[in-house]
Structure formats: structure tokens, C-alpha cells
Image: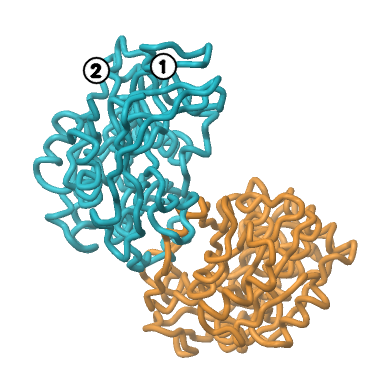
Chain colours: A cyan, B orange
């Protein structure tokens, strides 16, 4: 049995998450029982939602238990199988967590899924053709549901969700405007991801200047907004919404550290007859096949070319994750484990 | 031609609305042209939305023009008609405004509607079987869409919207909890309107105590909320929402005076996967017949017994309206004009 390096949640953050919240340990992988599969992880996915799980307080899911391997999506290869549906060498996506190997019950529905890497690189199943891609798809198609010609906006535009959002919105004939941090990310969003415009929030650090930038980038107003951030950016977007605009709330990254982050003018919900809806994509598994099919097709056609930031080795995961929370990544943040 | 006393919007409020914003004038009713109808108003409806119209700033409709008769719903009797569909003595509901008579184009769609007072008193067509009733119906059935056994809450519970909401929610097998100001209104909500519980916000003047009262009144959490007020009550309700709760935003009365009224914890939209939707009932005219039929039936069956506060004479309208904004009315606020 190979030895397995794992990262556990050692203690909960008080305010900002820090490297000391995590602990690296080495264990042996256990012998497989009937029906189980041993997967060697090639990539670990790092995602903002993990920050919410680190808190004890009520979040949109069970908290991550202390002393256990951090939750997380993984892609890898079957190295041993006692389940008839999986064989050595199969490429699979699952929720293996922050570790080099995982033992998976092959019978548990949805825990392990074989993937085809003919047209789609393995790592993309953690990003554009995985949870982040489906997240963009759900928010855009199921909540915002834009008509051709409408203007839709997304924050964290150059990330895994934002890049899929742009491709999906362009495929529906929308004007798509991004918000990202820094000129490099904004140029990338426009030049590579297909955004019609991208606003650098570092140049527009308050509601007033952001609202002005949005007015210029969205001359016909905003019909749909995909919220990854919260705070003053949401306030500014709401000021520019058209009547009957829809807001899909997927993340409020700035609020995870516990600082209260009020919405300044909720009366706009009434004035502009807005619909604001929060969602968690894992609660809508019935729609994943449809979403993954569209996303895989966009990748195969070259219409969705996501960027990745790759950290090397399981020991780099905590620092890479903390960087992600601060927007240091560029595109999908991964940890390469082999 | 009878003389007609009218109340005009003379100037816009700076902060709180005051009696000096209005002006009483007397004019002659003009001679009718072909197709027109002269209506003598029996009752004028006073509603919170009128405060929004008094502002120049963008609201959920066009601002009330200065120097013109204040907008408002009216019921009355046709006293002269040059339109084949209306005859003297017909009882009608319309948007006649703050005046004793109005001249209406009988051909304009939806401007004047004949009503039957066999089972429903004329004044109810401004309340339970009128715009407020349909407002409750729309928010409850089209946005909250409760399942049997769910808990639904409404602020301004003893008012025209709240009383219809209670009857509609009980007809759907819900637990219905109200929020109102003062022990008298709360007792009335429970004893007469069918609320399962009613919380006196004067006894719970902050988020913490209101959230505690809601926890007691809603032991299974809150699945739907109809928002007439805004402010800390909304904050407290959101703290008690169940996953996938729905919030219909119909009013934010506390915000009309221009004071910023933030929503303290919008992250709950994500944590509890809420849907929050603003609406204006006049934008959904296609659903009014269905709503009015259900509301009229509830009245005829004695299941919806709304209370009215009636001011006498057009000259009393401004003070009655300002009182409504401060919660001084008890049930539907009307002005009797004959």
C-alpha cells in the first residue's frame, strides 16, 4: 500500500484563514474491501466554497470536521479496483479531498465518475467541464436565463466560473461584461475569454466609481448578474440593473471572514423588480449531464479556453488556497500531485 | 356640471412627507365628450405606494407630476355616460385619483371596471377584492408558492394586504404568522384575520429580539415572507429562513423618506439558497381575474373579513395618508367622499 500525504483541517480560522489552520500528515492507504477503488490523484481542485466549510457556523453545507482530510474535488487514475465498473488505468473525477490517494466506495452514487480525455484535458474536469463550469451554467441558464441581446455581468471574471460564464453567455448572443482584479486579468478576459468588456475593480474601489464604470461598459443597463464576490460591487451592479433583472448568488467571498457586509440599498429589489437567488450547484445534480455536455462541446470547439494556475505538490495546497481567497490565482487554481 | 374638489401634489417632500406637500383646489367637471364617462367617487383608496410616487427620483413607476391630481384608486357610481358600455348608476372601480369626480375614457382598456356589490361591499374593491388583495395573492401564489404545512410570514399584518394574505395562506394549509404594531392590531390579526400568531414589532424593536420572537412563532422556520416594510424586520426574518425560502418584496415603507436602509446580512441569500423577488402587481394584469375571483369567494364565504379605517371628506385625505405612512390606520385606509 502506498503512503498517502494528507492535509487536515487542524483548527478553525478566527477571522482570516491562515496556513496554521491546516496540518500535513502521512498515512498508509488501507487495504481495499470488496466494492472499493483506490484512486491516485493527479490534480486537486481549490475553490472558494472551501473557506465557508472551514467555519463552524451555519454555512451552505456541513462544516468541514476538524482533524479530517479537507474536502475537495480531484481527478486521477484508478490504481487498484475491487469494483467491476472500475479498472486500473481508468481516469476518474471525484471528491477525493486534499490528499494524494483516496479509497472510494464504487457503489456510492455520484462519488466517482469515469471521464474521457480525448478532447478534454483531465484537469478541465475540475474546472470548465466540472463543478465551476456547471456552476456558471446553472446560474446563467437556470436563474438569469438571458434573452439574446441582453447584457450579463459576472464578478471574478477571469476565474474558472467566469471563463465558462463568458463562453456560455456569448453562445446565447449576450453582451457579457466581466469584473476582475488588475489590468492583466482584464486584458485576458477580453482577449482570450471573449468578454465584450472587463472592469478592473482595483481601479474602481468604491460604489460610485464602479457604478460609473458599469454604466460605460453596459450602455443598455444590466439584465443579469452572476455574483461571486459581494460587497460594494454588488451594490454598484444593482444601481445599474434594468427592470426585471436577475441576480444569481453563487459566492460572497468577501464575507467569509465574518465581517458584516451589508447590501446598501435593498429597496432596489422593489424599484427594479429584481429577482435575487442563491444556489449551490451540488443540489442540482439532475442538470449536470446537460451542463457538462454543453461545456465539453465548447471546449472541444475551442470556444472555451480556460486558464489554470497550478501549484506543485500536496504540501503547497494551503498557501495556494489562501492565495486564491486573495485573488492571486489566474484562472482555475489547481494543485498537481504527481 | 358639478364642482369638483381635488388634491394636487404641490411640491415634493424633503425627507418625510408633510401636509404642505398637497394643495386642495376646486374646479368644474368638464362637459363629456363622446366615449367619456363621469364618475362620482364614493371612496378613495390610500396606499403606501403613493409615497414613492411623490419623489422625483427613480421609483417603481413614473413620479406623480407636480400640480396634478394625486394618483389613487377609487370606487364610485356613474353619474353621466357617453359610452355605450356604461350607464348612470353603474358601480365602478378605477384610478380616479384624489378628487370627488373623474372623467374617464370608457374605451381605455382597464381604466374603468363595473363591479357587483351583491356579496362584496363597494369599498372592498379598493382593498380585499382590489389592488391590495391581488398584491397579497400575487406575492403568495406566484413568488412564495407555499406548500401545505409550510410557514409563511407577512409584515403589516393587519393591513389590507396582510388580511388577504392570511386568508389566502390559510386556504393553502399554511401556518401564517403576522408582524404588526401594537397589541390591539396583533390581537385582531389572530382573533379576526386567522393568523396563527402575530408579533408586535413595538415589543421587539431590534434584530435580536425580533429574531427571537420569530423563532418562537415559527418553530419550523420560515418558508415564505411577504415584505411590506424593510429594515430590521427583514434582517430578522432572513435569520430564521429555511433553505429554499422565498421572499416577495412588495414594499419598503421605511425607506421612502430617503434614509439608507441596508440589508445587514445578504450572505444569507447564499447560505439558505433564498429567492428574493420584487414585484408590482399592476404589471401582472393578466392574473387579476383569477386573483379577484378567489378573493371575492373568500369574502362571500366569510373567510376574509377585512377591517377599514375611513376618513371623511376629500380634505381629510392628506392627514389620513400621512397617518397611514406612520401605521396609524387599522386595516384598509379609505377616504369616504359622499
Chain letter behind tag 1:
A
From the viewer's perspective, tell me whether residue B241 is left or right of residue A210.
right
* Mark 2 chain: A
Instruction: Same chain for labels 2 and 1? Say yes or no.
Output: yes
B338 relative to B212 in the view: left or right: right
Residue placed furthest toward the left: A183
Q: Residues within 10 Å of mark 1 (few under 14, many from 20)?
A: some
Q: Position of residue B51 (x, y in %)?
A: 49, 75
Image point (74%, 48%), residue name? B290
Q: Is residue B334 placed above or below B114 in the rendered structure?
A: below
The C terminus of chain B, quarter of image: bottom right
Give the labeled residue for mark 2.
A302
Q: Is residue B125 visible?
A: no
Q: Where's residue B20, x and y in %?
A: 45, 90
Q: CA distance from mark 2 to mark 1?
A: 34 Å
Q: Dot 2 lies on which element?
A: loop
Name the one closer to the observer, B61 or A82.
Answer: A82
Mark 2 or mark 1, which is nearer to you?
A: 1
Name the residue beneath numbered marker 1: A80
- Residues marked 2 and 1 touching at CB (< 8 Å): no
Compared across the picture, whether A34 is left or right of B127 comes to left
Task: Left or right? Give the position of B73 relative to A186.
Answer: right
Instruction: Please identify the quadrant where the N terminus of chain B is shown.
Output: bottom right
Q: Position of residue B207 (x, y in %)?
A: 51, 77
- What's the residue at 49%, 50% (across, down)? A62
- The answer to which quarter of the image holds residue B123 is bottom right
How many labels were placed on the picture?
2
User: Relative to residue A24, is residue A305 depicted above or below?
Assistant: above
The numbered mark, 2 or 1, whose residue comes first in the sequence reads: 1
Q: Is residue A241 above or below residue A111?
A: below
Residue located at (43% from left, 85% from top): B16
Amino acid at each position: 500500500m502506498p503512503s498517502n500525504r494528507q492535509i487536515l483541517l487542524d483548527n478553525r480560522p478566527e477571522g482570516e484563514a491562515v496556513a496554521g489552520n491546516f496540518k500535513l500528515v502521512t498515512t498508509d492507504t488501507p487495504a481495499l474491501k470488496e466494492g472499493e477503488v483506490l484512486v491516485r490523484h493527479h490534480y486537486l481542485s481549490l475553490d472558494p466554497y472551501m473557506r465557508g466549510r472551514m467555519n463552524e457556523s451555519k454555512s451552505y453545507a456541513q462544516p468541514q470536521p476538524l482533524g479530517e482530510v479537507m474536502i475537495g474535488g480531484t481527478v486521477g487514475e484508478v490504481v487498484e479496483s475491487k469494483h467491476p465498473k472500475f479498472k486500473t488505468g481508468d481516469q476518474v473525477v471525484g471528491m477525493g479531498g486534499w490528499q494524494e490517494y483516496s479509497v472510494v466506495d464504487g457503489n456510492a452514487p455520484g462519488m466517482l465518475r469515469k471521464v474521457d480525455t480525448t478532447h478534454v484535458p483531465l484537469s478541465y474536469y475540475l474546472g470548465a467541464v466540472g463543478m465551476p463550469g456547471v456552476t456558471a451554467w446553472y446560474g446563467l441558464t437556470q436563474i438569469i436565463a438571458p434573452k439574446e441581446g441582453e447584457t450579463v455581468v459576472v464578478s471574478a471574471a477571469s476565474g474558472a466560473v467566469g471563463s465558462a460564464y463568458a463562453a456560455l453567455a456569448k453562445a446565447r448572443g449576450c453582451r457579457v461584461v466581466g469584473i476582475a482584479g488588475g489590468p492583466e486579468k482584464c486584458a485576458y478576459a477580453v482577449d482570450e475569454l471573449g468578454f465584450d468588456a472587463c472592469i478592473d475593480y482595483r481601479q474602481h474601489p468604491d460604489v460610485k466609481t464602479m457604478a460609473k464604470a458599469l454604466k460605460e461598459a453596459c450602455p443598455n443597463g444590466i439584465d443579469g448578474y452572476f455574483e461571486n464576490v459581494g460587497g460594494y460591487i454588488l451594490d454598484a451592479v444593482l444601481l445599474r440593473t434594468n427592470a426585471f433583472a436577475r441576480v444569481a448568488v453563487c459566492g460572497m467571498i468577501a464575507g467569509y471572514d465574518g465581517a458584516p457586509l451589508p447590501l446598501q440599498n435593498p429597496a432596489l429589489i422593489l424599484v427594479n423588480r429584481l429577482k435575487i437567488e442563491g444556489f449551490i450547484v451540488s443540489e442540482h445534480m439532475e442538470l449536470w449531464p446537460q451542463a457538462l455536455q454543453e461545456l465539453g462541446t465548447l471546449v472541444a470547439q475551442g470556444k472555451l479556453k480556460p486558464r489554470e494556475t497550478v501549484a506543485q505538490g500536496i504540501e503547497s495546497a494551503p498557501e495556494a488556497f489562501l492565495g486564491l481567497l486573495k485573488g492571486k490565482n489566474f484562472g482555475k487554481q489547481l494543485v498537481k500531485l504527481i
